[in-house]
Amino acid sequence: MEISVHWLFGRRVSYDWVDPCAAIESIEGDLMDADPSSRRFKRVLLCGDYHSGHHFGLTPPDWWEGQHGVLPRLAKIGKFQRALWGFATEAVKRLQPIDIVIVGGDAMDGKGERSGGVELRTTDRLEQGEMAATFINFIGAPQVRMVYGTRYHTGKDEDFEQAMIGHIKGNATIQGHGFFDINGCVIDDKHKVGGSTIPHGRMTALAKARLWNMLWSERKRQPKANIIARHHVHYHVFCGDGDWVAFTVPPLCYGTAFGIRECEGTVDIGMIKVDIFEDGRYRWNVILANFLEMEAPVESL
Ligand SMILES: [Fe+2]
Ligand SMILES: [Fe+2]
């Protein structure tokens, strides 16, 4: 079900609210431009924050918890893992072919030291990396660009996301801060950005990232970016003006004990696709999940 469509900076921006069991409804013809023969653009998929290894992180089928004949707590986890994997893989299938995937960090959840590892499917960061690589290989893009995530999750000393490279098919590289020129349109992607506890403050950190990019480009140390993408905060917002757009990429994970008990702000699940045409113009869409397992249970007394 589509929730809104509008033009932004002369480029069409549309929002699709994807139910893994429902069709992506199209507007003005084929929204997803699935027919590759008529495509005159490169398709970029931006995703990240899989937190694989966490019970509510992105979990491929080989690691799913059982749904039946197990403790209710484990059954709930198993149900969510299937819903999340179903959403992510269904969206990717409908976006094919994807030319480039940018994975924005926190591919794995890590050791979970602050909660004694009790929220984890596995504490083995190498195995968590294999889980995350399974999804990247499912995407199947010939070019895979990764940026490192938060060190608490991905390794305080060694970078365990680095170890994923060997498991990824296609041309894969990883770095701290990436600048990618695609048909003359520059994407500036890195993991961290400041979060905000107020809804209208969430865009400020993105606008600040844009200003820093301008100042770096004045010193000829960074290219001036057309698109600034950040991750880490687990919600989706965007801002911009006539010349640029900046957004936070939603994660592919959901509830943690920390988030539920200590945070109040809305979070999202999803990914962003950008089609960059031969002349550098681009069109971007966010694909957000909406499935029953995301609803807070209400107790009737
Ligand atoms: Fe994260
Ligand atoms: Fe992070």
Image (cartoon, helix red, strand yellow):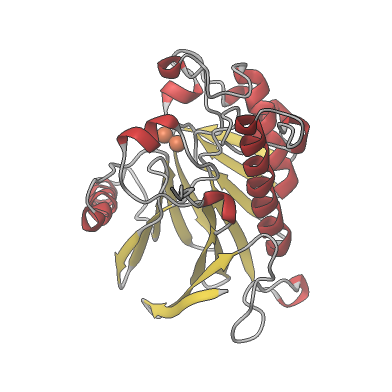
Quadrant holding ligand 1? Answer: top left
Task: Tell me what residue is drawn at x 72 percent, y 71 percent.
Answer: 34
Task: Tell me what residue is drawn at x 63 percent, y 52 percent.
Answer: 100
Query: Is 7 placed above or below 280 here?
Result: below
Query: Quick one: 19 or 4, which is closer to the camera?
Result: 19
Q: Position of residue 119 (x, y in %)?
A: 53, 24
- How many labels sit on residues? 0
Occupied quadrant, residue 37:
bottom right
Query: Is 158 placed above or below 265 here?
Result: above
Residue farthest along the front direction in this orientation: 301
Task: Tell me what residue is drawn at x 70 percent, y 62 percent.
Answer: 21
Task: Tell me what residue is drawn at x 39 percent, y 37 percent.
Answer: 260
Question: Can residue 280 be spotted in the picture?
Answer: no
Query: Is 67 placed above or below 21 here?
Result: above
Residue farthest along the bottom direction in this orientation: 28
The image quadrant where one finds the N terminus is: bottom right
Query: Quick one: 205 or 212, which is closer to the camera?
Result: 205
Q: Position of residue 93 (x, y in %)?
A: 73, 58
Query: Quick one: 76 or 145, which is closer to the camera?
Result: 76
Q: Position of residue 196 (x, y in %)?
A: 25, 46
Occupied quadrant, residue 227:
bottom left
Query: Is 276 placed above or below 6 here?
Result: above
- Left or right of residue 193: residue 74: right
Question: Can residue 153 be spotted in the picture?
Answer: yes
Q: Position of residue 178 (x, y in %)?
A: 46, 42
Query: Quick one: 294 or 31, which is closer to the camera?
Result: 294
